[in-house]
Image: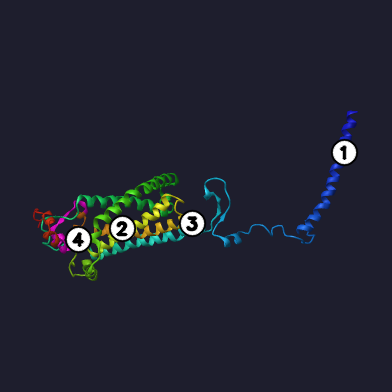
Amino acid sequence: MRRFVTLRGLAFAALLAITAGASLGQAVPALAQQTGVVNRDGGGQASGRNPTAESVNEEALFKQGNKIQGVVTIPDWKASVLEQPQGRDWRGFHEGAMPWIAGIAILGMLVLLAVFFFVRGRIRLALGELTGQKILRFNAVERFAHWLTASCFIVLALSGLNYVFGKRLLQPLIGPEAFTSLSQWGKYAHNFLAWPFMVGILLMLALWVADNIPNRIDWIWLKQGGGLVGNGGHPHARRFNAGQKMVFWIVVLGGLAMSASGIVLLFPFSAADINGMQWAQMIHAVIAAFFIAAILAHIYIGSLGMEGAFDAMGTGEVDLGWARAHHDLWVEEQAKTASGSQISPGRAPAK
């Protein structure tokens, strides 16, 4: 009896399967005719409505706006951006144009300085110009502002260059693990040292802006090549000559531009959307490349390029003969004021 019940159940199940198969066979051709689906052997004719006609078209969406954005219920509105084509432009700039811009600016400056050194040599004073007397060139506060800004700038420049060139030049040498750790700590240093760098920029602006206003003497200095080229001697100059004034304004204006774009990057999406962040990063990187190139020239002339120049920021005092040769009008001004007492006696220079 139990076997008979089982056989009858199996027969009933088979009947249901046959009926369902026949119904499906009739429904598929009808659906193919309505939707235009071609059957397996090539039969059938596309007719009726295309099911993708009303689907989302990516190109049409981009024509309406600069990004594809959905709706989210979480507080982070940035998560609603699904696709942003400007990101491809930013990536192309970062991976393509930016290394070339930075490489040409920085390496080009190094080549120019090397050629200048081998052609011109070190700028020295004439025999007998050194007096052995010292005059105060920069006080302690001024030297502090300079070295605060300079030391921060060196770390910022190196960590920034690692962002552009690190994975191309450094990672193959030290390996991915060491490069990752170095880049992480470099990022921390870049973020935190940006603040004392900005303080240093403001300090230098407050301390030296009055002495760095361009005037007619600067134009004469430039026409004479600043005494760097030719044999015309040292042109007249006050406390800062035209070349130093150019460096000052490059540092101040470039530093302020770097600070503004850097703050946008330090506080993501607080002042700009994703596209604004990309523009801030590109501007920051381009200014930094030319900034580094200009500071390389400043470092050269303040150390290897000119005899006695480093003493101004090293000890704060320079030889009176050096000051008369390079900043004669300033020495005259110091002699006429109370600060003229800062000219200290010293030993005669060695013959």
Q: CA distance from mark 2 to mark 1?
A: 91 Å
Q: Which residue is mark 1?
A: 12
Question: Quadrant where the N terminus lies?
Answer: top right
* SS type, badge 4: loop
Say whether residue 171 is left or right of residue 121.
right
| Badge 1 amino acid | Phe
| Badge 3 amino acid | Asn
Q: CA distance from mark 2 to mark 4?
A: 18 Å
Q: Which residue is mark 3?
A: 275
Say whether residue 259 is left or right of residue 236.
right
Q: Nearer the viewer, mark 1 or mark 3?
A: 3
> To which quarter of the image does residue 206 belong?
bottom left
Q: Which residue is mark 4?
A: 239
Q: Dot 1: few (<14), some (14–19), or many (≥20) neighbours within 10 Å?
A: few
| Badge 4 amino acid | Arg
Q: Which residue is mark 2?
A: 252
